[in-house]
Amino acid sequence: MIPFLDMKSVYTELKPELDAAYLRVMESGWFVLGKEVEAFEAEYAAFCGTKHCVGLGNGLEALELALRAWDIGAGDEVIVPSNTYIATWLAVTAVGARVVPVEPTPGGPNIDPERIAAAITSRTRAIMPVHLYGQPADMDAIMALASKHGLKVIEDVAQAQGAKVRGRRTGSLADAGAHSFFPSKNIGAFGDGGAVTTDDPRLAERLRTLRNYGSRVKYVNLEKGLNSRLDELQAAFLRVKLTKLDEWNDRRRKVAARYDDRLSDLPSLALPNVPQWADPVWHLYVVRTNRRADLVRALEAAGIGSLIHYPIPPHLQDAYAELDQGKGTYPLAEKLAETVLSLPMGPHMPLESVDQVCAVIRETFAA
Ligand SMILES: *Cc1c(COP(=O)(O)O)cnc(C)c1O
């Protein structure tokens, strides 16, 4: 049996450090907005290469609160990828703005800058690129467009913590970066968590207010905020995980390289294509094939986990029925939804297991 993602080994590898973090918080008697969150924010900002980090409740609210902090809402348009996890879209519609989906580059996975240019209108306020699967989006081109048209850019870094574009970390490449610490992400908590990284002190200050009932001083409410705080226990765990993030991303790179090596000659399988300017962190290793159903069946029979990210693009979800964008509206995203398959991946996956997965794939395509 080869699991899609081995989560148990996280605790096995870091048990003494995680247990110590747990005890430190329990014995402190302080559980919300204390020393651990403050320390994690400083450490994570330093890791990303930004001046500020604000710990939040989860990744979706990190995206949403950044938009709210810029007063983006009704009447505004935000450019989002047609090919993404639905959270990216939900953040935009939650603030009352309109999603303007843009297709990926051919073969994907990320938003195509040339198509962004064609989607900008007088109502456009922001672009929200996603570094899907841990593959950085083309930020140089996106930032050039944003600067030409006076738009804000927020990176959705949920799947790409530690990735780089020309040596600079994702999360530091735009006006803001929204991070998720959902357990399965490259740096995950043991529960929910999120953050925004930024160099802008005004944005950071507004987020600190918004996450805490619109308040900076107890019982004095400057605006209608919400409750979206990273909690002390998760922050303490994340501080432990952060010390391993680069090393664990390196182990993911080795797994990806092994897949590349063992599968590159198969004509019916398209492997991830990494631009020379990008240093991805392999949140997922996603292949494309027209024979996906056969492959899933063979992997399942061999006890190997696989998943589809994502089987239904946001515009075809019932949640967005009101947009009336039926099948055929975003053909590139739809084609990806029909052909992508994520193979087992993770920092604890032995290379021998990669070889076993590859053997099953080769057998399937030889038949
Ligand atoms: C996980 C994820 C999110 C949302 O993060 P949560 O912490 O689960 O709210 C947003 N965008 C992308 C691309 C994600 O993968």
Image (cartoon, grey):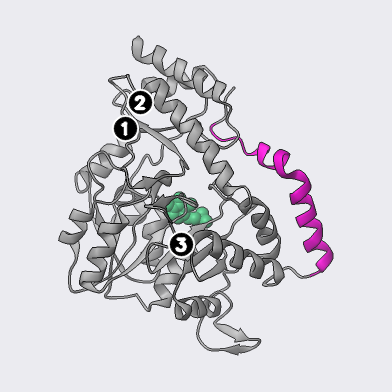
Magenta highlight range: 4-29
| Quarter of the image with the C terminus in it | top left
Residue denoted by label 1? 339
Residues at badges 2 and 1 in contact (C-beta under 8 Å)?
yes
Sooner in the amino-acid sequence: mark 1 or mark 3:
3
Q: Which corner quadrant of the image does residue 87 belong to?
A: bottom left
Q: Residue extending furthest front?
A: 167
Say whether residue 126 is left or right of residue 54.
left
Crowding near pointer 3: few (<14 within 10 Å), some, many (20+)? many
Say whether residue 24 is left or right of residue 87.
right
The label nearer to you, 1 versus 3, is: 3
Residue 161: x and y, percent? 49, 52
Sooner in the amino-acid sequence: mark 2 or mark 1:
2
Residue denoted by label 3? 178
Q: Is residue 88 magenta?
A: no
Residue denoted by label 2? 292
Name the amino acid, label 2: Arg
Residue 157: x and y, percent? 44, 56
